[in-house]
Amino acid sequence: MNTSIRLFSAPGRVEIGGNHTDHQRGRVLAAAINLEMTAIARRNNRNTICISGEESPEGPFSSKTSETRTNHTKKFEIDLRSLDVLEQERGTSAALVRGVAAWFSGNGHPIGGFDAQVSSDIPIGAGLSSSAAFEVMIGNVFKGLYGADVSQLDIAIAGQFSENVYFGKPCGLMDQMASAFGGLNMIDFQDPRKPVVTPVNADFPGFSICVVNTGGSHADLTQDFFACTNEMKAVAECFGKEYLREVPEDEFFASIGKLRRLGDRTVLRAIHFFGENERASRQAQALVRGDMKLFLQLVIESGRSSLAYLQNVFSPAYPREQGLTLALALSEKILAGKGAWRVHGGGFAGSILAFVPEVLIAEYGDTMSGIFGEGCCHFLNIRKEGGMEINRKE
């Protein structure tokens, strides 16, 4: 048995366009970033996965992980003899590992035990998809150590399966796809079995990508995420469809009077989907043409649609906590006519995304840090490589 030590990596991601469109088989514009999850791993002679990592805010482990702690490290084990969903593991990193293993095994791919030391510089809770990077990294570990014949799409799907079924979060496939494929891509999920990935060559000249972590927690917001998905599906079901992407837009708008029985927020969220799905495609086209003015305008339109129609900027259960709205208001004050700003990722708490002119980086960073705390601003670059094994030079 080959027990040599191997190194694996998977990046975090930013969502640039397509807010809450992927779970309705829509389009997104997303990019891998220069923050990553890494694992030093080797096969063991047990049918057990043993993972440990540094205990820090940037660590790979969710706050609910059922781990043991020694010498300022976190550690947990997964017995591969049982790949059933465990209720006590929901919401933990252990659930993510078990779920990825279950997908691999259930689809005929080899798995086995390994020991891994995991580290990360992706801040948890900043909306940069540390969980998706963790899932993609684990998928690449199985691929590298046990020779699983899987594509990056397979690894992304395994991660989504794990997060939906084992972890208990109703995410789409965007986060895992962005981490798995790397670079900046327009991804069309019309056929979820074969998403169309279109690379977009853009470097945002004169601007820096900034994600601002407002410090809100997603711990009690699962039902808010569920509501976005369920309400959009409720509209689709009125047309005999499962997803909004299958509903003709003109038929939807002609039927709004009847659809109001579902609730006005439900109708507004569907309006957001139709506009945002088209907008993501227009953003990609603007970047290809080098039209930054139009691109920035579309970013702002995306944010306003999320604010007014999707309504995922704060949880109705916590109306006093509106860090995202505050961050958007401050961004508009500083960047109006010069940059762009929008909700980032799932919303309700967490982070916003801004395109900041280089001449305003200091002012923007100082203002946000003064409100949301030191280290809240993450100025990012796009990483070309997705999830991968890093081959050591001999």
Image (cartoon, rainbow, N blue to C red):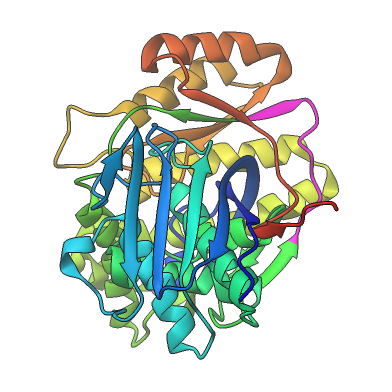
Counting from the top left corner in percent of width and height, residue 20 is at 43, 57
Counting from the top left corner in percent of width and height, residue 52 is at 41, 48
The image quadrant that residue 28 belongs to is bottom right
Q: Residue at x 23, y 44 (%)?
A: 219
From the viewer's side, name the closer residue of 53 and 276: 53
From the viewer's side, name the closer residue of 387 and 369: 387
Q: Residue at x 27, y 68 (%)?
A: 230
**Residue 354 belongs to magenta span:** no
The image quadrant that residue 206 belongs to is top right
Q: Is residue 131 above or below residue 294?
A: below
Image-based side of 49 in relation to 357, left or right: left
The quadrant of the image that shows the N terminus is: bottom right
Image-based side of 107 in relation to 325, left or right: right
Picture mark count: 0
Q: Is residue 135 above or below residue 213?
A: below
Residue 261 seen in the figure: no
Q: Residue at x 67, y 54 (%)?
A: 282
Q: Residue at x 64, y 71 (%)?
A: 2
Residue most extreme to the bottom: 108
Would you say the magenta stretch is mainly helix, strand or loop?
Answer: loop
Residue 160 seen in the figure: yes
**Residue 201 belongs to magenta span:** yes
Counting from the top left corner in percent of width and height, residue 289 is at 84, 48
From the viewer's side, name the closer residue of 116 and 367: 116
Span shown in magenta: 199-209
The image quadrant that residue 306 belongs to is top left
Counting from the top left corner in percent of width and height, residue 378 is at 55, 27
Image-based side of 149 in relation to 277, left or right: right
Image-based side of 140 in relation to 84, left or right: right
